[in-house]
């Protein structure tokens, strides 16, 4: 399963609306806006701040093309202001993943053709000195405050913006090699924002809760854009916290929240409170919450959980209905299909195939600077998810695994090969295979190593010293073997290897 909110229903794909059109009615709104910790910023002041930043960034770029600005920030108001600035047409924002490290993060910045990178005191150290060739500016420093003071919101002259204009580059998690930068147009944010606000009946009295990272499509599509479309207020949480979630929904009167991956599971692990069933929260929308967690969340908080299937690319959307079985994704409706990956013919009921959009790309705008990857994703004229599924007798589609060698950890897709390459740097490791170990939700990282003489202590020290090993890539389960089974073409036979594994050698 992929890692972002479901795309809009087919009827919304041709919706011509852009974010500036959704933001225009909010220009004079003072009684709704952005909550962050002890701060409140009205929509009027938020949009003025966004126009000021659009003018300031425009002066900073000084005509450089492409006008791509990397943003390496936690969920703070500056990120929201900058996204608003890009939405109004000032530049293209590039969401940089704060869990990436060192050379890997520098490679993302180069891959996206960033001309400027915005950081904070909290994130500046993630980019090694001398590793990038473009300037950075720290929003906690005097250069940023002086830059903003040098311009006025009125200095920004908004260009005409179309639905297909590029607004943001959002990185995939690198499931088949280096992360790819997904092109996200104005339409990709505006159309789902309108569709979800209308579908859920959200309006001016609602308060949305954004605790998922803003470099990710889930937060900006299912949170920020929905809030704008509904004319609702929104609450920013610097970083997701299960106990913080429970406190915040009370403090701010939250009525709607979005999630991806395990957050609901973590919230349910907090101690139950006597007034949980009396909170204002009424709807939660996202991906990959288990059936038991959905039911328990409703029992405990009285909030309906709507779980969908989709990705940042937004090529396929599957949405659960009220009658969807607990273990299914939702009804299989055209243009979605489950096909034989080789022949592209629909598979029979109960037979496993690849989940695709048979009509074309959906809202997939391609990968930035990677035509080969774009063409691969659209092989056969269909949007290929790379995910496997099967359809039951009643027409509901069930998730059945992954075509590629990748895994899902805490709501993020992780490629196995980059982790294997890091493990192979160890002088004692001659072969390494990384496998997803099924957890209650998603996977944990398992590693099968051929490494005579390796000790647990030396492996832990080695992993800790790798600058490009992200925290979610850290293997937690390790098997030591004498050899690994191969196919006839000398590739590791992963299925056979997984089936042969007994008790792990170590838990890290």
Image (cartoon, grey):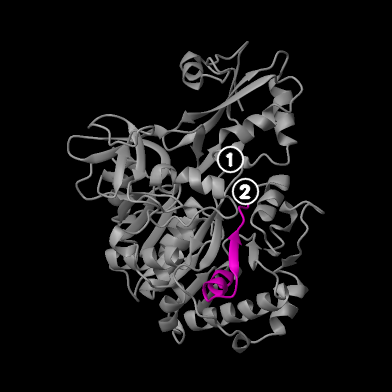
* Residue closer to the observer: 238 or 269: 238
Residue under label 1: 472
Q: Secondary structure at mark 2?
A: loop
Q: Position of residue 435 (x, y in %)?
A: 53, 27
**Residue 157 magenta:** no
193 lies left or right of 396: right
The magenta span reads: 81-99
Q: Quadrant of the C terminus?
A: top right
Can residue 367 be spotted in the picture? yes
Q: Position of residue 401 (x, y in %)?
A: 40, 33
Q: Quadrant of residue 175?
A: top right
Circle count = 2
Looking at this view, name the residue that lies furthest to the right.
Answer: 130
Point 57% across, 43% down: residue: 174
267 lies left or right of 329: right
Q: Mark 2 packing: few (<14 Cα in 10 Å), some, or many (20+)? A: few
**Residue 92 magenta:** yes
Q: In this rendering, is residue 290 above or below 141?
A: above
Q: In this rendering, is residue 230 above or below 127?
A: below
Q: Position of residue 68 (x, y in %)?
A: 64, 65
Q: Mark 1 packing: few (<14 Cα in 10 Å), some, or many (20+)? A: some
Do the CB atoms of the residues marked 1 and 2 lie less than 8 Å apart?
yes
Point 73% across, 41% down: residue: 467
Identify the mark at residue 99; answer none if there is no mark: 2
Q: Secondary structure at mark 1?
A: helix
Point 64% across, 80% down: residue: 55
Looking at this view, name the residue that lies furthest to the top.
Answer: 482
* Residue closer to the observer: 58 or 476: 58
Q: Quadrant of the N terminus?
A: top left
């Amino acid at each position: 399963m992929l890692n972002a909110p479901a795309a809009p229903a087919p009827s919304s794909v041709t919706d011509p609306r852009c974010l500036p059109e959704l933001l225009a009615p909010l220009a004079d709104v003072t009684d709704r806006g952005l909550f962050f910790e002890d701060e409140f910023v009205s929509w009027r002041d938020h949009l003025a701040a966004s126009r000021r930043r659009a003018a300031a960034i425009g002066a900073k770029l000084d005509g450089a093309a492409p006008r791509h600005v990397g943003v390496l920030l936690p969920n703070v108001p500056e990120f929201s202001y900058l996204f608003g600035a890009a939405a109004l047409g000032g530049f293209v924002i590039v969401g940089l993943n704060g869990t990436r490290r060192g050379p890997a993060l520098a490679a993302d910045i180069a891959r996206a053709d960033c001309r400027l990178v915005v950081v904070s005191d909290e994130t500046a150290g993630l980019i090694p000195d001398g590793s990038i060739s473009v300037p950075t500016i720290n929003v906690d420093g005097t250069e940023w405050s002086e830059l903003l003071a040098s311009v006025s919101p009125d200095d920004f002259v908004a260009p005409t913006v179309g639905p297909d204009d590029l607004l943001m580059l959002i990185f995939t998690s690198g499931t088949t090699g280096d992360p790819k930068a997904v092109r996200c147009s104005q339409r990709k944010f505006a159309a789902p924002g309108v569709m979800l606000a209308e579908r859920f009946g959200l309006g001016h009295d609602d308060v949305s809760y954004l605790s998922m990272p803003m470099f990710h499509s889930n937060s900006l599509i299912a949170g920020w854009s929905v809030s704008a479309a509904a004319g609702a207020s929104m609450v920013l949480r610097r970083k997701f916290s299960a106990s913080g979630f429970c406190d915040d929904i009370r403090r701010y009167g939250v009525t709607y929240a979005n999630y991806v991956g395990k957050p609901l599971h973590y919230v349910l692990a907090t101690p139950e409170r006597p007034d949980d069933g009396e909170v204002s929260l009424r709807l939660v929308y996202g991906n990959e919450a288990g059936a038991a967690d959905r039911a328990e969340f409703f029992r405990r908080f009285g909030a309906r959980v709507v779980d969908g299937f989709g990705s940042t690319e937004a090529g396929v959307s599957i949405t659960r209905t009220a009658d969807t079985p607990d273990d299914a994704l939702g009804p299989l409706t055209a243009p979605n299909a489950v096909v034989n990956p080789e022949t592209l013919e629909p598979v029979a009921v109960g037979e496993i195939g690849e989940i695709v959009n048979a009509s074309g790309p959906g809202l997939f705008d391609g990968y930035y600077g990677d035509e080969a990857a774009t063409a691969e994703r659209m092989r056969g004229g269909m949007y290929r998810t790379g995910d496997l599924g099967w359809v039951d007798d009643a027409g509901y589609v069930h998730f059945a695994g992954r075509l590629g060698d990748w895994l899902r950890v805490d709501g993020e897709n992780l490629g196995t090969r980059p982790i294997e390459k890091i493990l192979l740097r160890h002088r004692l490791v001659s072969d390494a295979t990384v496998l997803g170990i099924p957890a209650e939700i998603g996977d944990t990282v398992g590693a099968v190593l051929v490494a005579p003489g390796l000790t647990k202590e030396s492996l832990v020290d080695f992993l800790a010293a790798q600058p490009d090993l992200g925290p979610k890539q850290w293997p937690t389960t390790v098997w030591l073997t004498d050899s690994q089974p191969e196919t006839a073409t000398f590739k590791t036979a992963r299925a056979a290897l997984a089936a042969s594994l007994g008790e792990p050698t170590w838990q890290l």
